[in-house]
Amino acid sequence: MLISHVDLRVRDRSRAEAFYGPLLQMLDATPRRGDEWTSFAVPAERGVHWLGFIEDGAITPNATRVAFVAPSRELLNRIAERLPQLGALGIEGPDTSEGYYAVFFEDPDGNRLEVMCASEG
């Protein structure tokens, strides 16, 4: 394992919860909420322990991208279909332009994201 967690900044925590909640629950992540933070955790054997965020009205999105792993192309396709309803921006794919199956998009704050699947099925 290379990464323990990812800690994002978002402008509006409630809006981010509405976006990330359904997306990450489709990937079997469990939500947790503290006084100033929200996180979504997966079992440690799956790599990243958790993705979380706190509110910061001064964030400026950049070219950094966070990629989530879907266990199948079927699930990735279901996620891709749901992205517009969640408020994702700049949706591209799914496609195999990077040598694996992926969909690229941004959260409502412009943070760059990806869901990828390296499997053939």
Image: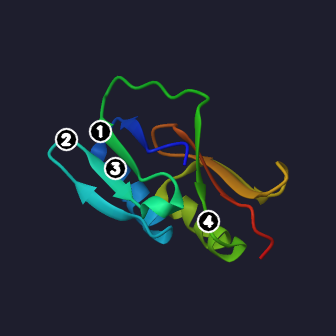
Q: Residue 116 carries which label?
A: none
The amino acid type found where label 2 is placed reads: Glu
Residue occupied by mark 1: 54
Mark 1 crowdedness (10 Å alpha carbons): few <14, some 14-19, many ≥20: some
Report x, y in % for residue 19: 42, 56
Residue occupied by mark 2: 36
Q: Mark 1 or mark 2, which is nearer the start of the sequence?
A: 2
Residue occupied by mark 3: 15
**Image: 56 above or below 5:** above
Mark 4 vs mark 3: give the one in front. 4
Q: Is mark 2 on a helix, strand or loop?
A: loop
Residue 96 quadrant: bottom right
Q: Mark 3 or mark 4, which is nearer the start of the sequence?
A: 3
**Image: 70 above or below 65:** below
Q: Quadrant of the C terminus?
A: bottom right
Foreground pick, 72 / 3: 3
Q: Which mark is residue 70?
A: 4
Q: How much space separates mark 4 and mark 1, taking CA atoms?
A: 25 Å
Q: Do the residues labelled 2 and 1 touch (CB within 8 Å)?
A: yes
Q: Is mark 1 on a helix, strand or loop?
A: strand
